[in-house]
Amino acid sequence: MTEASLGWLPLFGANARRTLPGQGPGQRLTTLACLAHVSLDAAFVSPIMLFRGLAHLALRPPCFSPGGCTFRLTDKDIADIAMALPKLEEALFGHVCPVNSCLTTVSSLLFLSARCKNLTWLEIHFNTTNLRRDLESMVENPRLRDLCALPKCPLGQLIVSQAPFLIEEGDYEPVLAGFRCIFPSLGGVAGMVEGWFNLTSMMWGME
């Protein structure tokens, strides 16, 4: 899907909304890729969420724009996506940039892992500024506690691309434990910053 074809998305979405559950394009469409230069926000993903049969979702807009990072989704938006698209197996929510201005946290990862049970591949922005604290606070959050107890997806590798690595060496073990709580099958965190490779190497050494 390119910028020129984006206008068709609401029309397909309207058709999906009119069909009965289990019928029509809302269930038949399994793959959607978008290369258009748009902001990833709630308004953009709203019609996409009508295609409940999606297994492969690739949203690849250029991350940078004159206004900064184009990733504008929140944890609530990701929670809504996870509920609407439970059949997701591969999900790319843009190439993660180094700006670290996003409003999403690791809670978004938990929503996807607990709701999309077939998810095996994921790239998504999440703010890494207070990563250890965010991971440890999930079990203390009444809204997230029940999700922590649910079975999780079989994701093997989390893609973070250019996300900043802001973890002190003493935080490695609790951060790894937090990631493994979200993704029990996690074998590595793939990022361009050297720290992510070091974190993954430690993960391998703990197995």
Image (tube, rainbow, N blue to C red):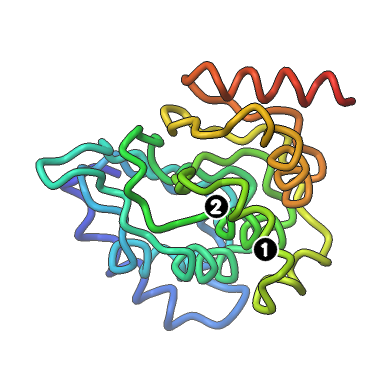
2 vs 1, front mark: 1
**In the displayed structure image, the side of residue 87 where residue 97 appears, left or right:** left
Residue sitting at the far right: 207
**In the displayed structure image, the side of residue 73 where residue 79 appears, left or right:** right
Task: Please say whether residue 25 is visible from this viewpoint.
Answer: no
Q: Is residue 188 above or below residue 86?
A: above
Which residue: 55% across, 33% down?
159
**In the displayed structure image, the side of residue 175 where residue 64 appears, left or right:** left
Q: Which mark is residue 195?
A: none
Q: Is residue 75 above or below residue 165?
A: below
**In the displayed structure image, the side of residue 126 where residue 114 appears, left or right:** right
Res 136 → quadrant: bottom right
Camera-side residue of 141 and 50: 141
Cα distance, mark 2 to mark 1?
31 Å
Residue 124's spot in the image, x, y percent?
48, 44
Res 65 → quadrant: top left
Circle 1 packing at 10 Å, graded few (<14), some (14-19), many (20+), is some
Which residue: 24% across, 52% down?
39
Task: Name the quadrant of the C terminus.
Answer: top right
Q: Which mark is residue 138?
A: 1
SS class of the residue under badge 1? helix
Please state which amino acid type lies under the numbered disc 1. Answer: Met
Residue 55's spot in the image, x, y percent?
59, 51
| Circle 2 residue | 30
Camera-side residue of 161 and 132: 132
Task: Name the quadrant of the N terminus.
Answer: top left
